[in-house]
Amino acid sequence: MASVISKALKITGELESTEDIQIDGQIEGDVRGVGVKIGQNAKVKGTVYGDEVELAGTIDGRIESKKVILAGTARMTGDIWHQEIKIESGAYISGNLKPEFGKGDGKPVHKPATVTPAASTSTASAAPASPSSASTGNATTPAHH
């Protein structure tokens, strides 16, 4: 059974549970639970941690979760660290989606990462490219000789 924070409650501080949490009120602070559901009229200012986070309300902060579900009424301002994500039509996100959650051998997922070609957001990563072919003009220069 989930712990419920009703719409009449406003909590300032950290909220932590070893079970599921249903939030319908307002939280200023971090939230940790197994499954965290943030209702349509709920607001959280802080980081939400959980195995599964379902957002129908508003978060101003960050989500760090294995599975994230954003309902059509969701309003997310901040980054989402995830392994799996579902975004319904109408959801608002201002931030970055980071599919690296859980990678890093138990270290915090928000540690600075070194950039490697595999981490590139380029969609043209099917074939290895030499550094010179990535700059403009170099690929066509030999044809002019």
Image (cartoon, helix red, strand yellow):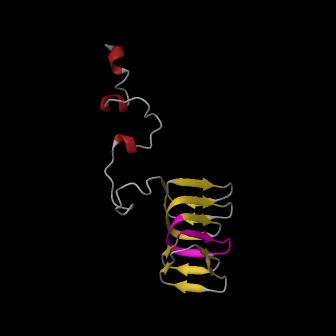
- Residue 2 in picture, x, y percent from top left: 62, 76
Locate residue 9, reporting x and y percent: 62, 86
Our reading of the magenta stretch's main secondary structure is strand
In this rendering, position of residue 15 left or right of residue 57: left
In the foreground, 3 or 57? 3
Q: Is residue 22 above or below residue 69?
A: below
Which quadrant is home to the N terminus?
A: bottom right
Q: Residue 41 lies in magenta, yes or no? A: yes
In the rendering, at what x and y percent does residue 91 appear? 64, 59
Identify the residue shown where x is 37% and y is 27%: 137
| Above or below for 63 versus 18 | above
| Residue 42 placement: quadrant | bottom right
Q: Residue furthest front?
A: 1
| Residue positioned 48% across, 37% down in the render | 123
Does residue 141 lie above or below 96 as drawn?
above
* Of the pair 60 and 36, the residue shown nearer to us: 36
> Is 127 placed left or right of 25 in the picture?
left
Q: Is residue 143 above or below residue 136?
A: above
Residue 56 belongs to magenta span: no
Camera-side residue of 61 and 65: 65
Magenta stretch: give its range. Answer: 34-51
